[in-house]
Amino acid sequence: MPEGLWPILAIVAIVVVYVLARVFQYMRLSEQQWREVDKSKLKTWEDED
């Protein structure tokens, strides 16, 4: 393998790990916010098709 390939692969791996960590963080935040919603005020929507 070319010598300069390892730093590029390391940077790509770091970016992928960072993006996955942010996605899971936002998933947890979304789940927490959904648990805190007053569900008695939610309406059911009907499509008008």
Image (tube, rainbow, N blue to C red):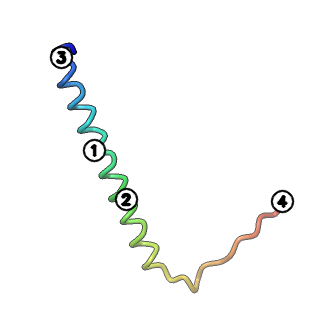
Mark 1 and mark 2: Cα distance apart in space: 14 Å
- SS assignment at label 4: loop
Q: Residue at x 83, y 59 (%)?
A: 49
Count every numbered label the image shows and give the total: 4
Circle 2 residues within 10 Å: few <14, some 14–19, many ≥20: few
Q: Which mark is residue 17?
A: 1
Mark 1 and mark 4: Cα distance apart in space: 42 Å
**Quarter of image, res 14:** top left
Give amino acid for label 2: Tyr
Mark 3 and mark 4: Cα distance apart in space: 57 Å
Of 1 and 25, nearer the camera is 1
The image shows residue 23, relative to residue 14, as above or below, that is below
Mark 2 and mark 3: Cα distance apart in space: 34 Å
- The residue mark sitting in front, 3 or 4, is 3
Circle 4 residues within 10 Å: few <14, some 14–19, many ≥20: few
Give amino acid for label 1: Val
20 to the left or right of 44: left
The residue singled out by tag 2 in the image is 26
- SS assignment at label 1: helix
* Quarter of the image that includes the N terminus: top left
The residue singled out by tag 3 in the image is 4
Circle 1 residues within 10 Å: few <14, some 14–19, many ≥20: few
**Quarter of image, res 12:** top left
- The residue mark sitting in front, 1 or 2, is 1
Give amino acid for label 3: Gly
Q: Residue 49 carries which label?
A: 4
- The residue mark sitting in front, 2 or 3, is 3
Query: Which residue, as the protein is rendered here, is positioned at the far front?
Result: 1
Instruction: Provide residue 10's location: percent of width, then percent of height.
Output: 20, 31
The image shows residue 9, relative to residue 24, as above or below, that is above
